[in-house]
Image: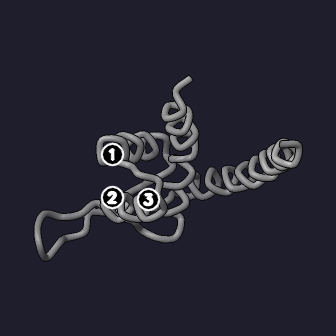
Amino acid sequence: MDIENSKAQMKKGILEYCILSIISRGEAYASDIIDEMKESKLLVVEGTLYPLLSRLKNDGLLSYNWVESKSGPPRKYYQLTEEGKTFMHELSLTWTELVEAVNHTTNKTTNQL
């Protein structure tokens, strides 16, 4: 069994939630999202982020604004739509339930080792 693959799959499963969580705090530029994810040790690259942002936008969860930049081309800043806020709220509830269930299960396992 490949532990690196298992770890990658676990991280991939929460990537959307983490990205939406960052954007839920206010408008976010893609490179800022990447920086925050790296800071949190959830490494994500542009080749992963941009298709995900595009899908979330196409699903109606995100919108964006173009903002002129003083040092280059305009920047695209993402924000949650009303539908995105509802979706994010539901994900937060599910995440809390999942963390509690996993902790309950793994704590029993850890105590038996």
Disc 1 + disc 2, Cβ < 8 Å:
yes
Q: Nearer the viewer, residue 50 or 99?
A: 99
Residue that sits furthest to the left in the current view: 72
In the picture of the structure, the residue carrying the numbered disc 2 is 30
> What amino acid type is highlighted by mark number 3?
Met
> What amino acid type is highlighted by mark number 1?
Tyr
The residue drawn where x is 13% and y is 63% is 73
Residue 90's place in the image compared with 55, above or below, is below
Q: In this rendering, which labeled residue sits more in front, label 3 or label 1?
A: 3
**How far from the left and from the top, in percent, is residue 81?**
51, 57
- Element assignment for label 2: helix
**First-in-chain label (3 vs 1):** 3
Q: Quadrant of the C terminus?
A: top right
> What amino acid type is highlighted by mark number 2?
Ala
- Element assignment for label 3: helix
The residue drawn where x is 30% and y is 47% is 46
Residue that sits furthest to the bottom in the current view: 70
The residue drawn where x is 62% and y is 55% is 88
* Rendered image: mark on residue 50: 1
Q: Nearer the viewer, residue 50 or 103?
A: 103
Measure how far apart labels 3 and 1 are at the Cα level: 14 Å
Q: In this rendering, which labeled residue sits more in front, label 2 or label 3?
A: 3
In the picture of the structure, the residue carrying the numbered disc 3 is 37
